[in-house]
């Protein structure tokens, strides 16, 4: 029933995503998981990460409760809002500098993002 | 189009996993309870390790009313060990009998909490310790004044020298000593702990069923997890008529409007009334609040939702919380220096 329209939607999403990837070919997307109230990149807990200007961080919630990632840093101020397990939100860092990223709900979750 | 159909299938799988994940939210693997057991050591900073001399000095200071401007209120006035290290009041009473806006939190197991106060404004117990002494509405004391008052007493001079050799009586050593004493106030073994360790009858059947609800349908563990039964996080529980900004006063992030720190559930039976404003008299009232999914929906924590618990599930939760009450740990009061 709904499967077909879902498929179409996913196809469209894929095509758009592919187009975007082509446009910003040099910028990377790094997935940062929220797991057991820590930030995890490629399976390792991180408290600091270095990326290039233009790169995007995709925050993905892997815990059974909500997280709310934000930064009030001068470099980049953002509030991704709260999102549940399985969902993700992205933020792109376009200027060089350092940003402190935290979870509003769980302030123990803290990470420094250095943008080169 | 082979690539596309494979991809579609993959995306479907991802979607399916996501859905299953959401369905399983709130349900913890029933057999692994190790995360509820006490960590090996009390957390303590390298520059202020717990020693007997520091603990004893901290205890003297904690129970000494001369630390307040009126010489009448000690830390122990509100954090009364006979009342679960709280005061049994909806909100605290401070200097000049003034009624304060928030409930006195227990100091049980604060060593295990990374942030102090209801709004988490202090990162360490050392930073927390001086706050209520200085606060006009609480102990209303001038810190330089109290240092002078303590310095004329030989008993305190000796005790500070024993605890912090060569460092003198300063705001820093005052804070360090009180923080050390607070760190030693930890929960004792409860029926729940004995049950986790394998004593099958340590906790009643009702409490055991309550623990199941706690982990599953009741969604309690989403915030009240781990040894100290707290995520050390901040949540708006939708309390009716409460307009305290809470954590938002410290961090201007939308979700924190009206959010307060998750308190421990250890010894919770002893610390009525409940919530940051003390609006509920009993644990039953608290469970009813959660069962309704909160009252004020504006900026409600997203983990909150109506729970549809029946009477026996609610009774189980209360029995389980009461099974978190530790063995009594009598406190001996220090004799305070008079000269
Ligand atoms: Cu979080």
Image: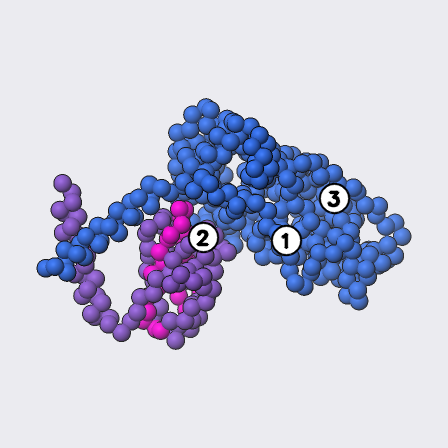
Residue for badge 3: B73
Residue B143, how many percent across, how many down? Answer: 73, 57
The reply to whether the magenta stretch includes residue A70 is: yes
Residue bounds of the magenta highlight: A52-76
Residue for badge 2: A36
Residue drawn at the location 64% of the way across and 37% of the way down: B326
Determine the image quadrant of residue B334.
Answer: top right
* Chain that is coloured blue in the picture: B
The reply to whether the magenta stretch includes residue A61 is: yes
* Residue B97 in the figure: left or right of residue B116: right
* Residue B221 in the figure: left or right of residue B181: left
Q: Of tags 1 and 3, which is closer to the observer?
A: 1
Q: Colour of chain A?
A: purple
Work out which residue is located at the far bottom of the displayed protein and give it: A116
| Viewer-closest of A78 and B302 | B302
Q: Secondary structure at mark 2?
A: loop
Residues marked 3 and 2 touching at CB (< 8 Å): no
Residue B31, how many percent across, how many down? Answer: 46, 41
Number of marks present in the image shown: 3
Residues marked 1 and 2 touching at CB (< 8 Å): no
Residue for badge 1: B41
Residue B81, how many percent across, how many down? Answer: 70, 39
Q: Quadrant of the N terminus of chain B?
A: bottom left
| Viewer-closest of B61 and B148 | B61
Kindly tell me whether mark 3's CB lies below 8 Å from ligand 1.
Answer: no
Residue drawn at the location 39% of the way across and 33% of the way down: B306
Kindly tell me whether mark 2's CB lies below 8 Å from ligand 1.
Answer: no
Tell me the crowding category of disc 2: few under 14, some 14 to 19, or many 20 or more residues within 10 angstroms, Cα based.
some
Residue drawn at the location 52% of the way across and 54% of the way down: B250
Q: Secondary structure at mark 1?
A: loop
Work out how far the residue at label 1 is from the one at label 2, CA to CA, in angstroms: 21 Å
């Amino acid at each position: 029933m709904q499967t077909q329209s879902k498929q179409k939607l996913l196809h469209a999403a894929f095509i758009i995503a592919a187009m975007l990837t082509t446009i910003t070919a040099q910028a990377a997307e790094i997935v940062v998981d929220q797991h057991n109230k820590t930030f995890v990149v490629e399976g390792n807990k991180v408290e600091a990460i270095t990326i290039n200007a233009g790169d995007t961080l995709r925050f993905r919630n892997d815990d059974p409760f909500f997280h709310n990632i934000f930064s009030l840093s001068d470099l980049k101020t953002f509030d991704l809002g709260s999102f549940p397990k399985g969902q993700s939100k992205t933020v792109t860092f376009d200027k060089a500098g350092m940003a402190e990223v935290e979870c509003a709900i769980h302030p123990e979750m803290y990470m420094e993002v250095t943008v080169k | 189009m082979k690539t596309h159909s494979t991809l579609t299938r993959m995306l479907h799988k991802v979607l399916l996993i996501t859905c299953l994940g959401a369905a399983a939210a709130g349900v913890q693997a029933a057999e692994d309870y190790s995360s509820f057991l006490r960590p090996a050591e009390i957390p303590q900073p390298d520059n202020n390790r717990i020693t007997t001399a520091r603990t004893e000095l901290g205890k003297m200071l904690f129970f000494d009313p001369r630390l307040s401007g009126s010489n009448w209120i000690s830390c122990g006035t509100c954090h009364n060990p006979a009342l679960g290290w709280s005061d049994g009041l909806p909100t605290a009473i401070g200097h000049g009998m003034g009624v304060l806006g928030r409930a006195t939190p227990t100091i049980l197991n604060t060593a295990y909490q990374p942030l102090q106060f209801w709004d988490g404004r202090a990162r360490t117990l050392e930073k927390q310790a001086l706050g209520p002494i200085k606060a006009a509405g609480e102990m209303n004391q001038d810190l330089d004044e109290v240092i002078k008052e303590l310095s004329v007493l030989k008993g305190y001079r000796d005790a500070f020298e024993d605890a912090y050799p060569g460092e003198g009586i300063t705001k820093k050593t005052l804070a360090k000593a009180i923080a050390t004493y607070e760190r030693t106030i930890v929960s004792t073994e409860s029926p729940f702990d004995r049950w986790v360790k394998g004593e099958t009858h340590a906790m009643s059947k009702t409490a055991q069923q309550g623990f199941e609800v706690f982990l599953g349908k009741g969604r309690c563990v989403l915030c009240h997890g781990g040894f100290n039964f707290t995520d050390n996080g901040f949540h708006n529980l939708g309390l009716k008529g409460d307009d305290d900004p809470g954590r938002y006063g410290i961090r201007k992030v939308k979700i924190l409007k009206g959010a307060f720190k998750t308190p421990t559930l250890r010894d919770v039976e002893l610390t009525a009334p409940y919530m940051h404003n003390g609006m509920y008299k009993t644990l039953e009232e608290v469970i009813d609040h959660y069962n309704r999914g909160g009252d004020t929906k504006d900026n409600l924590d997203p983990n909150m939702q109506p729970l549809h618990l029946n009477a026996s599930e609610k009774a189980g939760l209360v029995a389980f919380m009461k099974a978190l009450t530790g063995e009594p740990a009598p406190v001996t009061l220090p004799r305070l220096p008079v000269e």
